[in-house]
Image (cartoon, rainbow, N blue to C red):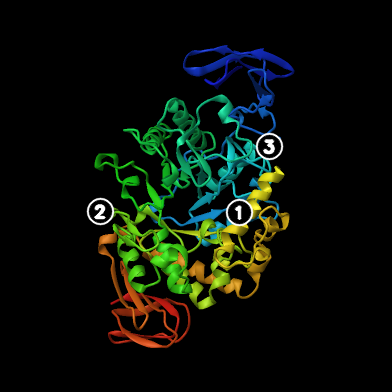
Amino acid sequence: MIFRVWAPKAAKIAVECNGLVVPMRKESGGWYSAPTKGSAGDDYSYLIDDQSSTPDPRSRWQPGGIHGRSRVLDHSHFRWNDTDWQAPPLATGLAYELHVGTFTPEGTFLSTIDRLDHLVNLGVTHVELMPVNEFSGSHGWGYDSVDIFAPHHCYGEPNHLKQLVGACHTRGLAVIADVVYNHYGPVGNYLERFGPYFTDRYTTPWGRAVNLDGPGSDEVRRFFCDHALMMLKDYHFDGLRLDAVHSIFDYSAINFMEQLASEIDALEQELGRDLILIAESDLNDPKLIRSPELGGYGLDAQWNDDFHHALHTVLTGEATGYYQDFGTLASLAKTLQNAWVYDGCYSKFRDRHHGRSPHGLSGHQFVAFSQNHDQIGNRAKGERSSHLMDADRLKIAAAMLLTAPFVPMLFQGEEWAASSPFLYFTDHQDPQLGDAVREGRRREFAAFGWRPEEIPDPQAHETFMRSKLDWSEIAGSPHREMLDWYRGLVKLRRERISPGDLRLETATVKYDEKNRWLAYERGSLEILCNLSDRPMTVGSSARDLLLASKSGFRVNDGSVAMPPMSIAIADKR
């Protein structure tokens, strides 16, 4: 076989495989190559300028972790069982975000398969995996990946990940991979030894930015595009979720994300199956999901944080940090009609105008949620909504999410009001880095009034273990009742809400800020919500109630009597 590596910073480079050190021949463009007797299953590493051995930047397998030797992997050896597979449309889908390490007690790719039938019975169509690429230590969120071409060794072998994807497809579930192209982890990042992968021209909250528009950036862009294509082609993922694209800095005429979308469109034609790209961004910039013909980048959808913030603040009353920009029924009504609350208007939190109008876009281009890993895990104690709200409010949040004009996404365990928190946890083997993460976390939340000793230690193994789901609690109260509520809502959405009902321009929303009620229509349905602590009667075109969060609703001629803190879905007259 032939080993190839891009290493323009190296004066010389050799590959070590099967006990032999083979000098590599320099090629044009900073590439090096060497033929060897290596084959699938062999371990190898690179020697740069006679320094210690270094993993391959494009390593497909790191069985010993981020500092270990790379292992040759031949993707063609795996036998897939998903011939003619087509993912269900995202527009009619229900996404479900999960973290492999905490989704099951074992925390592996293979053990995840054992719980897929639960997702099918719930009505999930798209499973979104938090990053599964190689990162520091045995457990973590995965956003500090360093060997992005290799699945995390503690989750299982590369073929185990393929088995998971194949098992999802067998059950009719599409699979989306969460990928990180805006930064690299602080430990095990050997890319700088090889080439100009990073730049000092921009900074991110996590350190140096990826070099996508400076000298040498052509090959850096190729590196990340090739990773995306590998995930979709060799692992059969149906789409990618791009982490924090607001920290991807690129002022090229053709933006990296536009290039990526174009190449994935070409792969889609080659494979004959639908592929999707979803962005996470806090910029509220419709350019990401507008078509290239209209000056956009051509991504398929993006996360809608404004919906979460508007719903969360109305139900909890929280008003710190970015939540200070929300908290009114007016904000909640606006996001139901417009996707974004901040579409060019003034943001108190930012002390400037923020966002741009998404006019002309469809609701299916926005992924909405009432919980996700960030909104839970970035709290001091990793509290879920089930720790912050009573059952009445939880039911309202679920009903509004699953009737909103967006693609809904659940976070693991949300559907049964899981009792386990989802904490921020790490396993950095470098003691100094571990101390820095621990102290940084304490300083961050001390500013919000938390006592340092109350903040869970990210490096403690107990912090990770506490975040694992307890599947046994589903059978007991109140978890079983909440799961039944979610299943009823998902069934109603599937049967009664069509893609045509996701058009934002057709949304009709009424509300009363003083009396704390809100009503909106979705196709032939009317959703009625009483957010006050007293019963009330509101005008309505409701005919029959299809689903109600509690007893006490009464449909009269032209009005509905609603009990306190409740929500119902009705047929319109």
From the image, state whether disc 1 or disc 3 is nearer to you: 1
Residue 425 visible to an observer of this rendering: no
Residue sitting at x 57%, y 58%:
444
| Number of numbered discs overlaid on the protein picture | 3
> Which image quadrant is residue 478 in?
bottom right
Check disc 3 and report the residue beneath it.
65
Callout 2 secondary element: loop
Whole-percent x and y of residue 435? Answer: 68, 50
From the image, state whether disc 1 or disc 2 is nearer to you: 1
Check disc 1 and report the residue beneath it.
440
Determine which of the numbered discs, if any, sits on residue 43 in the image: none
Q: Earlier in the sequence, mark 1 or mark 2?
A: 2
Callout 3 secondary element: loop
Check disc 2 and report the residue beneath it.
360
Whole-percent x and y of residue 538? Answer: 32, 84
Q: Nearer the viewer, residue 484 or 457?
A: 457
